[in-house]
Amino acid sequence: MTVGLSIFDLLTPVAVIDETIMETNIKVAQEYFNRIGRNFRPHIKTHKIPALAALQLAAGAKGINCQKVSEAEVFADAGFKDILITFNLLGAARLDRLKALNSKVDLQVVADNTVVVDGLAESFDKAQPLKVLVECDTGAGRNGVQSPAAAVELAKRIAERSGLKFHGILTYPKPSSEADVEAFFAETVALLKEEGLACAVVSHGGSPSLFDSDLVPSATEHRAGTYIFNDRSLVRAGMCDMDDCAMNVIATVVSRPTETRAVLDSGSKALTSDLLGFSDHGHIVDYPDASIVSLSEEHAVVDLSRSERKPQVGERVRIIPNHTCVVTNLFDRLVFHRNGVVTRMEPVAARGQVV
Amino acid sequence: MTVGLSIFDLLTPVAVIDETIMETNIKVAQEYFNRIGRNFRPHIKTHKIPALAALQLAAGAKGINCQKVSEAEVFADAGFKDILITFNLLGAARLDRLKALNSKVDLQVVADNTVVVDGLAESFDKAQPLKVLVECDTGAGRNGVQSPAAAVELAKRIAERSGLKFHGILTYPKPSSEADVEAFFAETVALLKEEGLACAVVSHGGSPSLFDSDLVPSATEHRAGTYIFNDRSLVRAGMCDMDDCAMNVIATVVSRPTETRAVLDSGSKALTSDLLGFSDHGHIVDYPDASIVSLSEEHAVVDLSRSERKPQVGERVRIIPNHTCVVTNLFDRLVFHRNGVVTRMEPVAARGQVV
């Protein structure tokens, strides 16, 4: 068995999680939200593992956030009772599954357009209505209604349907846009009040500006995923330090074709091609001046020109990924450790759940 | 069951394969290699499905190419007997598995350095020696010895070890570098002959320049993966047309937040972030003037400014991915169809096999 082994004796590439750092990340975020008096709803996309969501709830989180019906099913089967799905859901087969889910757990979904609202309304009935939040685009340029007035329009349409219950508003914000989010939320909440529509939930989100959530006083809850492991993108955002990153991908140096080139066995099948604005593919903890300049599926090419020390073939190195969530989705299991000694393995139960 | 459904009635995102196009791709490539009198060894990385490798062998391919021991195990278990693993293999636990594999199938591996050769030599013995090819860097700048002289040096070291059998040379080339590859190969073959070392295999590879393989007359075999499905990168390379692309990711338009923005449910968990040099994330067959400008894990943001027609919420669209192989690795199964009617589903048996 793997438990008790050194993480440097595992077959590579492998994604490992430092339990101590992870526990601290969970605790520090929850304490922050306790302090500002706000509900916290972790997004499971970063770990996709029920045992980790259980730690987040035990620390004080209110419920969980999933992105797809199939993910929510995995977590409902694992016993989670308070689930928000933050994706526009369409299609009869999917809505049948959603209805089954709504009969088992306290479920909320989002909508940002009338097609989605009408589809949901046709699938649900007043015996067991579905709670719907209106998704707002407060600047991220992805999904969401474009103005507080449009949010209220859609809220009214939801409130009119007997199978649905208008439950609140939600945004996935652009990082460092707290003032814009607060302005959008405050205006929408005021307009909803004028219309006599109760707005139980005002949901803000994101890991990069997690500790600035108090700058959005209208919010009643915050959603975040990446904070549990942290990653290179969050270090860049000033949200944490390298020492707060719980996930490493461990890779082996398989080739040293030239004096300045090393090749690792952690290609895009381990690190993904997600640059997240970086020009290279992760931070090599053991060779911080080396740069992962390109990936193919199984190879990572490392430029050693600026690294005084050079690794040897066979050596293991630890990489902090640019983006942890996408790495988790590539592995069937994550390996956990304390001080480099393996403590457990957890199947990534909701890996690859796309529908 | 899904068989018999229209591909436009499937839950999205979903990766679908047009069987007719795939069969033509298999046939056309094999006929080319038959014509130039060269062995063809398909790389399974593109499909990771034994049933498809079986079609490639039935068409005339000599054997298969895997990248990892774990992939080779899946295909050996499925009955494949001639397997080349094109990756430097290190570590006792991995080499134990390799040895078990070598007792079941006709196996070849590669090496480009002495650490790998010595590790292999310690794990194998003359009762059942392991065939080893020397990997050469002919310009791609990844793994490989840097010169014909270095290739011969390593070949001699392999030939000296009783557990190993020097079996030939191999390159993964830079596209359109046939002259460089031929020069490297021809010189190495001549030097090996001078040393009295038999070189059974001279292995060339890659899909982008597959139909220029005759420009490398020293080669005895060609390896390629992507050609079976083709993709947007191979259209750009001039290797095929859009109509020759067998894989589509089908996505649903889930939001139309503005006049010029659509959002699809095919994020980086379906399309990957692999740009392969493109500035956008795939070709939308149904809206060729629309551009997938950014991906997050579950959302694809589409710019419709240059598209006269605009899709509606709920509409399904077909996307030709930039790079098929990485898409396959994200899905637990691929759905096959003829003329849009589902014919079968195949589990991606070797998905996520990284060690």
Image: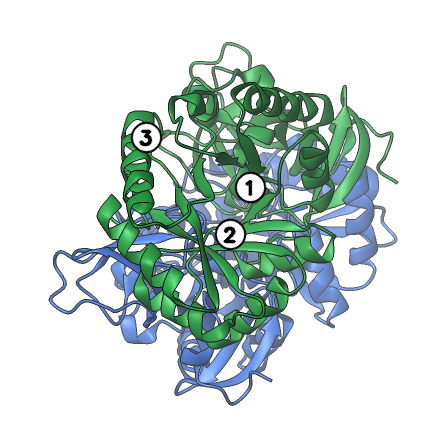
Chain colours: A green, B blue
Residue at mark 3: A182
* B230 vs B352, nearest the viewer: B352
Q: Secondary structure at mark 3?
A: helix
Task: Write down the quadrant of residue A29 in the picture.
Answer: top right
Image location (x, y in percent) of residue A151: 29, 50
Residue plotted at (75% across, 40% down): B120
Q: Residues within 10 Å of mark 1 (few under 14, many from 20)?
A: many
Looking at the image, can residue B335 be seen? yes
- Locate residue A97, reporting x and y percent: 58, 69
Q: Which mark is residue A67?
A: 2
Q: Is residue B182 shown left or right of residue A45?
A: left
Question: Dot 2, crowdedness within 10 Å: few (<14), some or many (≥20)?
Answer: many
Q: Would you say A122 lies left or right of A310 here?
A: left
Identify the residue at horizontal 18%, vertical 58% (top origin): B304
Amino acid type, callout 2: Gln
Q: Return the residue at label 1.
A: A43
Q: Are marks 2 and 1 on the same chain?
A: yes
Label 2 is found on which chain of the structure? A
What is the chain letter for disc 1? A
Furthest residue toward bottom: B4
